[in-house]
Image (cartoon, helix red, strand yellow):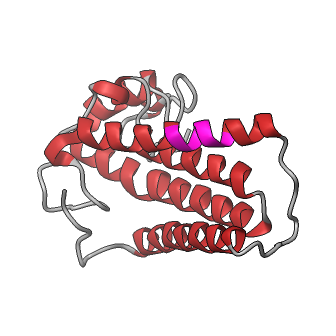
Amino acid sequence: MALPSRDMSARERVAGGLSAAAGVGLCAATGLALAHVSVPPQVSVAPPLRFLGRALVGLGTCGILGSQLAMREAWRVGVDRAACVPLIRHGPYRLVRNPIYTAMVVFMAGNALLLANGVMVVALTLLIAGVELQVRGVEEPFLLDRHGHDYVRWAEKTGRFAPLLGRCGARRRGHRQRIGG
C-alpha cells in the first residue's frame, strides 16, 4: 500500500476531506448511540432492517478487504502520478470499476440502518459525495490518461459502482474526452 502523495490536487483534498468527515461522523454516531444520546431524526428500526444493517456492514467489510487484496501492490490511498499503476481488471474489478468505494458505501449504509440517527445520515451523504468527486474528478481522468483505450474498453463494459450501471460510451466520444457517464 502507498500513502497519498504531497502533490494532491484540490479535488483530491476535498474528496479526501469529505471521506474523512464521513469517518468522523461514523465514529460520532456510534459514540452517541453507545451513550444512548438521541440525535434527530432518530428513528426506530424494525428487527428485519437491523438484520439487513448487520448484513450490509459485514458485506461491506468483506468487499473492502477483498477488493484491496485483489489490487495487490497496486492498492494505494489517493493517486500517485509518479507510479506505474497497472489497470486492475480481475477479481471484483471484472464486474465493477470501483468495488472498494462501493463496499465503503454499503458498509456505511449498513451502519446508517443500525444507528438510525441524523449524524449517520450526514456521514453517509458526505461519503457518497467524496467518493463521487474522487472517482469522477480524479481517478477516472488519471486512469484514462494512463491507460487510454484499454481503460475506455473496460469502462464501456464494466459498471462504475455496480455491475452494468455507469458504463461509459467514451469510445464514441473519443478516448481523450473526460469520462463522465
Q: Is 153 drawn above or below residue 82 in the view shown?
A: above
Q: Nearer the viewer, residue 23 or 150?
A: 23
Residue 98 visible in this rendered orientation of the protein: no
On the image, the x and y values in percent for residue 96 come to: 44, 30
On the image, the x and y values in percent for residue 99 come to: 43, 38
Q: Is 5 drawn above or below residue 151 in the view shown?
A: below
**Residue 30 drawn in magenta:** no
Location of the N terminus by quadrant is bottom left
Residue at 23% across / 72% down in the picture?
Answer: 5
Q: Main secondary structure of the magenta part?
A: helix
What span is colored magenta in the figure?
53-58
Residue 67 visible in this rendered orientation of the protein: yes
On the image, the x and y values in percent for residue 8 come to: 32, 73
Q: Nearer the viewer, residue 13 or 53?
A: 53
Residue at 78% across / 34% down in the picture?
Answer: 48
Looking at the image, how many numbered discs can be counted on the residues? Answer: 0
Q: Nearer the viewer, residue 9 or 107?
A: 107
Q: Is 92 drawn above or below residue 18 in the view shown?
A: above
Would you say 23 lies left or right of 75 here?
A: right
